[in-house]
Image (cartoon, rainbow, N blue to C red):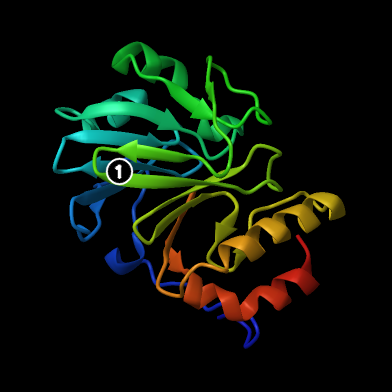
Amino acid sequence: MSKPDETPPPPATAEFGHVTPGGPTHVYPQRDCMRVKKFSVGPFDNNVYVIECTGTGEALIIDGASDAARIAREVEGLQVIGIVQTHGHPDHVQALGDLVDLLKVPVYAHPGDRMPVKAQVLHGGKTLNVGEIEVEVIGTPGHTPGGLCFLARGHLFSGDTLFPGGPGNTGGNASKFSEIMKSVDRLLELPDDTRVSPGHGLDTTIGRERPYVETWRARGW
């Protein structure tokens, strides 16, 4: 049970994008031409997302985490334009080599994080086009120097920067914690109904999390 000053944990239901490693794929309600799928892979319960433009068949993969064969199956029949990385921690990049071989697509990542494959440079403030969908790139350092989030039509893919209940782990490093909280503060400027889909576990919304930011700041991480 959560304390009164902490974010109540979301229930493990489809409403909050509940998936399990190797389990069924969750498909979100479609927003115009934007169709988003979420599935979990690997021993660290990593979420992988596919943004698809149903009007053109183009698609973007978020995080080549693990199980390249599963990821490749999830994009069969789609025109994948690339893979974008939220950051470079090992559990988020293990499938990249195999995916590049299988799909023949570029990987995009911030140069602050090392990748196991050649990656095209991506910075916050850029926009990627997936068919008719604009995906905004948001620089969110803290969990790693090269942390990135991606925003498309009110859906934020937050990597390990923002979870239900607070920011990603910074290992007790005060400087990194200060940096990630600055990143979180920027994300919390988004509208309340913005869906937040992190790199692990359940979804949340900006409106659910914003009231507790000062609790997180005082708690540290």
Front in this rendered view, residue 112 or 137: 137
* Residue 111, placed above or below residue 157: above
Front in this rendered view, residue 129 or 8: 129
Q: Please state if 65 lies on the left or on the right of 160 as rendered.
A: left
Q: Please state if 90 lies on the left or on the right of 75 as rendered.
A: right
Q: Please state if 178 lies on the left or on the right of 28 as rendered.
A: right
Residue at the extreme top: 101
Q: Considering the image in quadrants, where does the C terminus appear?
A: bottom right
* Occupied quadrant, residue 23: top left
Visible residue check, residue 102 = yes
Q: Considering the image in quadrants, where does the N terminus appear?
A: bottom right
Residue sitting at x 62%, y 42%: 147
Residue 185, image x and y in percent?
A: 65, 65
Residue at the extreme bottom: 4
Front in this rendered view, residue 31 or 14: 31
Residue sitting at x 77%, y 49%: 171
* Residue 172, placed above or below residue 9: above
Front in this rendered view, residue 168 or 187: 187
- What amino acid type should be assigned to the residue bearing mark 1? Ile
* Residue 209, placed above or below residue 156: below
Residue 11, image x and y in percent?
A: 39, 72
Residue 165, image x and y in percent?
A: 58, 69
Residue sitting at x 52%, y 78%: 8
Residue 53, image x and y in percent?
A: 21, 42
Q: Report the residue marked by disc 1.
A: 51
Q: Classify mark 1: helix, strand or loop.
A: strand
Visible residue check, residue 66 = no
